[in-house]
Image (cartoon, grey):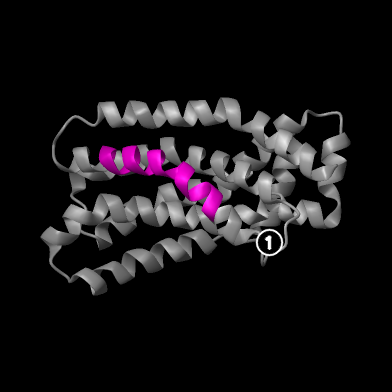
Amino acid sequence: MIALLLRDLKLATRAGGGFGLGLAFFLIVCTLVPFGVGPEGEILARIAPGILWVGALLSCLLSLDRIFALDHEDGSLDLLATAPIPLEGAVAVKALAHWLTTGLPLTVAAPVFGVLLHLPPEAMLWLVVSLLIGTPALSMLGAFGAAITVGLRRGGLLLSLLVLPLYVPTLIFGAETVRAGSSALDPTTPLVFLAAITLLTGGLIPFAAAAALRINLR
């Protein structure tokens, strides 16, 4: 499994592997929003939690089709399905690799993007914490959608339609955590719900995605 993780990390960081694509998209979103809603800091600060979380969500969405599609094209996915390691474990490792190359960089860079949107300094910590806890759920749910659509031609649009509704609870509680932190309110409750979603997806998604892969590989 460690070899599989290292392989996916190397593929993602190579030219054309998609590493940095999410960060670039996140930066573009955060840069364009002030042009659309105006430069007033008060307005930007009020909408910043939602914009930052929507930007992170869409940035994660960009690279989801790479989780299994490339392995399916070169036959590696068939080898994984017949390998001694459980397919559920392989799914979890590939979702982890996606998070390490997409969710984690977004989490690290988020405070810089928060400055662009005039996010209050007291909310920066909650922005990082919420993304650190919530983005693994985005990768897990994305792995499930990628497993269902693997092998489909031009399945990117279908993948987006499948995954976006599943992202809604994570988006709500993630943005609410940052909003509560910026308003000097207690963000514990939305943060607990966010952590619960991540734990639930981490426990269930590998089995559901592995089942979907087995059906698609028959």
- In the picture of the structure, the residue carrying the numbered disc 1 is 14
Q: Going by the image, does 93 lie left or right of 109?
A: right
Q: Nearer the viewer, residue 17 or 32?
A: 32
Task: Find numbered disc 1 in the image and state the secondary structure of the residue it sits on.
Answer: loop
Please provide the residue range marked out in magenta.
161-177
> Per the image, is 174 magenta?
yes
> Per the image, is 119 magenta?
no
Q: Residue at left 70%, top 48%? A: 8
Give the x, y percent position of residue 204: 59, 27
Q: Residue at left 39%, top 68%? A: 28
Height in image: 45 above or below 6? below
Give the x, y percent position of residue 46: 17, 53
State which quadrant residue 100 falls in: top right
Give the x, y percent position of residue 76: 84, 48
Give the x, y percent position of residue 37: 21, 69
State which quadrant residue 109 falls in: bottom left
Q: Residues within 10 Å of mark 1 (few under 14, many from 20)?
A: few
Q: Going by the image, does 70 lie left or right of 177?
A: right
Q: Residue at left 14%, top 60%? A: 43
Considering the whole magenta stretch, tell me its main secondary structure.
helix
State which quadrant residue 181 falls in: top left
